[in-house]
Amino acid sequence: MSIGDVTSGPIGASHPPADAAALGRLADVAVRVGLGLRPGQELVMTAPLDALPLARAITECAYRAGASLVTTLYTDELAALLRFTHAPDEAFDRAAGWLYDGMAAAFRSGAARLAIAGDDPSLLTGQDPGKVGRANRARSEAYVPALELIAGFATNWTIVSAATPAWARAVFPGEPDSAAVPKLWEAILAASRVDRDDPVAEWARHNGELRARTEILNTRRFAALRFRGPGTDLTVGLADDHEWHGGATTAGNGIVCNANIPTEEVFTTPHRLRVSGHVTSTKPLAYQGTVIEEIRVTFAAGRITEATARAGAEVLRRVLDTDEGARRLGEVALVPHSSPISRSGLLFYNTLFDENASSHIALGQAYSKCVRGGLGMDEPALVERGCNRSLIHIDWMIGSGAVDVDGISPDGGSEPVMRDGEWAR
């Protein structure tokens, strides 16, 4: 599951989808399905500049749904690049903590959170990896007050996406923006189930299917999952009293929301000390402007002891050195290889989409809601059950049509959960 952050966004003119009505349908899904926005509730939204048409459409839908105030923070990739070109060296250890503190205060007071994704996945390629790593760490540290509330589902939140030229060029290389951007919009709308006659009803049906899958897994009460495939033999122990979740969830304020639009996953919390073996990524990871490819890591006693990558290795190393919890898992998620996003055949270079085409794991912060009674527990109680704590939460993909998953029972017995990337039953 992806967690929205305040990051840089694309530059240039706005590019709404060719079908203007589709923009309204996506905004309606974001407000009604993604957020479940309550009348009188405030909304804090972040968006790249190129997402202006979608941000305005969401703002209109939010006010029509009774929002008391919509506050949107726009970001600009040019400003991010200017920092790396001109800022003094010491500037890369700083972040706008006042901004994240303000966002955390808004969430504590009941505001909903919405992030529009659309970043250039290769924005910082070629920049000094040391500066990239320092800037990411500073932002992660500053983001903690807001991250804890989001990861703990203290309020209702969601992430949706807008097609932007830089992102479209990554997904459709070699094509002009005039062709690539409409193609990316088409893919976003299809994956978000906005191309249906009644998107809200379609989301209700889809959420029901995901809920049924979580009920099956929660009944099984596996102690661990074992992933086997090319370059992978990984055993992920599950947190004590873990719960599987997927699709719609009830936030701590009682509002039902869909945190990720789109979503195809069911997920839970691993035990921070019970992960062993080795695993190879099956898709590139686009992280804060750097594309990290062919990740290979080895776990022992829950901790990554070896890590390599064909591209972006230095950024990966610095991510793993963020804090002690960065080398441990905070999430494991199952996604069938036949998911609509996988069937599209597209590599999105965007975790929100690519994680919903493939089973995945996440480094760092765990979701407290994935432990029975976890939303009411303090940190020591969560850690005792195996939940990981970290400044980061980074999903990366390990599933494919060649990966099998077995559930391991507390007595050591094994049963198929996935075969060749598909549900076994």
Image: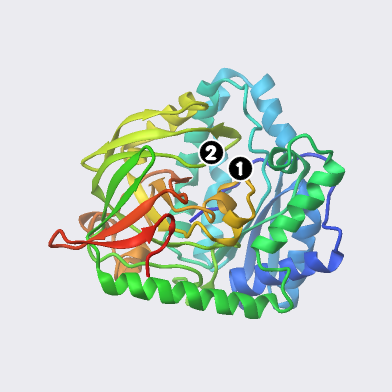
Residue 241 in sight here: yes
Q: Position of residue 167 (x, y in %)?
A: 71, 42
Q: Position of residue 231 (x, y in %)?
A: 37, 37
Secondary structure, mark 1, is loop
Of residues 340 and 217, the one nearer the viewer is 340
The answer to whether 219 is drawn above or below residue 23 in the figure is: below
Residue drawn at x 66%, y 40% is 8
Do callouts 2 and 1 mark residues in contact (Cβ within 8 Å)?
yes
- Residue indicated by mark 1: 349
In percent of width and height, residue 380 lies at 23, 56
Between 224 and 91, the one lying in front of the other is: 224
Residue at 58% over, 79% down: 204
**Visible residue check, residue 40:** no
Determine the CA span between mark 2 and mark 1.
7 Å
211 relative position to 387: left or right: right
Apparent side of residue 411 relative to residue 159 in the rendered image (left or right): left
Relative height, residue 230 to residue 24 (above, below): above
Q: Can you identify the residue that label 2 sits on?
A: 284
Q: Position of residue 300 (x, y in %)?
A: 23, 38
Relative depth, front residue between 384 and 228: 228
Q: Amino acid type of disc 1?
A: Tyr
Q: Amino acid at mark 2?
A: Pro
